[in-house]
Image (spheres, rainbow, N blue to C red):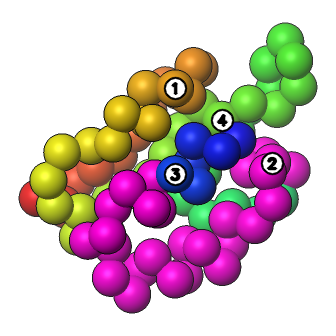
Amino acid sequence: MVELRLLLVACPALHDTRSSLQASWVGDDPCGGNWARVTCEQGREGLQVVGLDLSLLEFKGPLPETLGHIELIKSIRLDGNE
């Protein structure tokens, strides 16, 4: 799912956390690997992203539009950001 990778590019305020997320966000299947802070559930078409935990990552500014492209998202944690 390319949208999740675009999140890293769109949010330069991630500082050092960005490199640790990038290290775990490898490949094109966040549900098939061990992507940090991503929650998946079984759906009609297999595993699908339903949650993102982006808390305490020091985000600043508006959220990237790419988050809206994750169709089945149920939860996005953003506490601890600006």
Q: Give the image location of residue 42, x and y in percent.
A: 81, 26
Prevailing SS of the magenta stretch: helix
The image quarter containing residue 36 is: bottom right
The x and y percentages for residue 6 are 52, 51
Identify which residue, 6 or 17, lies in the foreground: 6
Is residue 62 inside the magenta stretch? Answer: no
Classed neighbour count for the residue bearing mark 4: other residues with Cα under 10 Å, few (<14), some (14–19), many (≥20): many
Q: Residue at x 84, y 12 (%)?
A: 44
- Amino acid carrying label 3: it is Leu
Per the rendering, the mark at residue 6 is: 3
Name the amino acid type tagged 4: Val
> What residue would you read off at disc 1?
69
- Dot placed on the residue nearer the N-terminal end, 1 or 3: 3
Is tag 4's residue or tag 3's residue first in the polypeptide sequence? 3
**Magenta residue span:** 7-32
Q: Secondary structure at mark 2?
A: loop
The label nearer to you, 3 versus 2, is 3
User: Residue tagged by mark 4?
Assistant: 49
Position of residue 79 measured from the top left corner of the image (x, y, whole percent): 22, 53
